[in-house]
Amino acid sequence: MPLATSSNRYLKKLAAITFIGIGCTTAHAQTSGTNVTFYGRVSAGVDYQTNVAKPDGSTGSLLRAAGNQWGTSMFGFKGSEDLGDGLSALFLLESGFDATNGTTNGSALFNRRSYVGLNGAAGSIKLGKNLSISNDVWYIDPSGQQFMSSATLVHGRNWQGVNNVIEYQTPTWGGFNATLQTGLGEQVGSLTKSRKDGISLVYSNSAVELRAIYDTARDPNGKFVNVYDTSKELILGGVWTIDKLRLFAGYENLSAPDAPTNAPDKVNHYWLGANYQITPALTLIGSVFRVNANNGGGNANLLMGGVTYSLSKRTMLYASLGTVRNSSNANFSVEATDNSPLPGKSQSGGYVGVVHNF
């Protein structure tokens, strides 16, 4: 095993100090009205893809360990304090990591979420870092935002995070609620450079959930130059629950009006799918996704099927299989990775593994 770098040692020490500090807070919580929870998830398995393009123009299959394919491994701390009169303080610190090598998903210690806020009768406000509001597509994605999901054919556009966030969520009235989110770019003399904004509208009852999401992500010059990164995004979709069956439908539109003339500046993305709970432990997943990108971006169809089996309330087995069919000028991957096939070629893949929640 190689020796840890000084940076890694620093992160380990900082994480240990944070853990001890939270532990002390938990002990104090018994008398102060504060509660703190340490939680997490570890996911790992085996992943296989066919027809992966190689630098010399040939292709080959790829067998590797699966770290974040079904969902990222992560750990976090969350807590709240009762301030009286229906008002409470809240915080959340959360970091994602790859269980196959122990590295974090990015350089930040808390790379997913780190915010503090207040919650009361008028709604909640959060300040700090959070997932982009477009991550809420998870609720209307039959594949649950795994590597073969609504994220795949848009290169993870709906996986983004937001720094310097100010977020407000309304109370729920008659099944309706809304969330407003902005991430300040913190550029001198500009309110638009590197800025992210979003709004989400939700209606839900016991059988139906409908969502509308709109967000924008600008580059350091305040422009929309990459349809899969710095762009405008609209998501519409819903879920219909009929006993043990859940039916999903969604639509996503991406636009980047400042993109280069030889790059896609518009993308339309559609999906349908279903989950069926055969037994309390066994669930089947099926979904189909289609993407159309203009300016030579091509189109593709992704078909995915999967199964999850719960061994307990905390431990689950998963298996997912999929195939992507590309048009002549498209090279979308079957998974949300850079392991793409050659243009016009199909690709298949799958992964199996174990998830444990704590």
Image (spheres, rainbow, N blue to C red):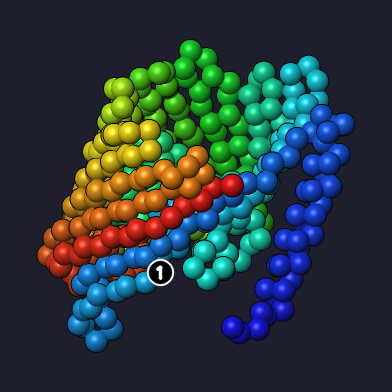
Q: Quadrant of the N terminus?
A: bottom right
The residue shown at (29%, 34%) is 278
Residue 227, image x and y in percent?
Answer: 35, 55
Residue 23, image x and y in percent?
Answer: 79, 48
Whether residue 325 sits left or right of residue 186 in the image: it is left
Q: Determine the residue located farthest toward the top in the rendered image.
A: 174
**Residue receiving disc 1:** 65
The residue shown at (74%, 71%) is 10
**Does residue 112 appear in the picture of this structure?**
no
Helix, strand or loop at label 1? It is strand
In the image, residue 254 sits, relative to residue 339, either above or below, namely: above
The residue shown at (71%, 31%) is 118
Residue 121, image x and y in percent?
Answer: 67, 18
Q: Amino acid at mark 1?
A: Ala
Q: Determine the residue located farthest toward the front in the rendered image.
A: 311
Task: Give whichever of 156, 196 is nearer the camera.
Answer: 156
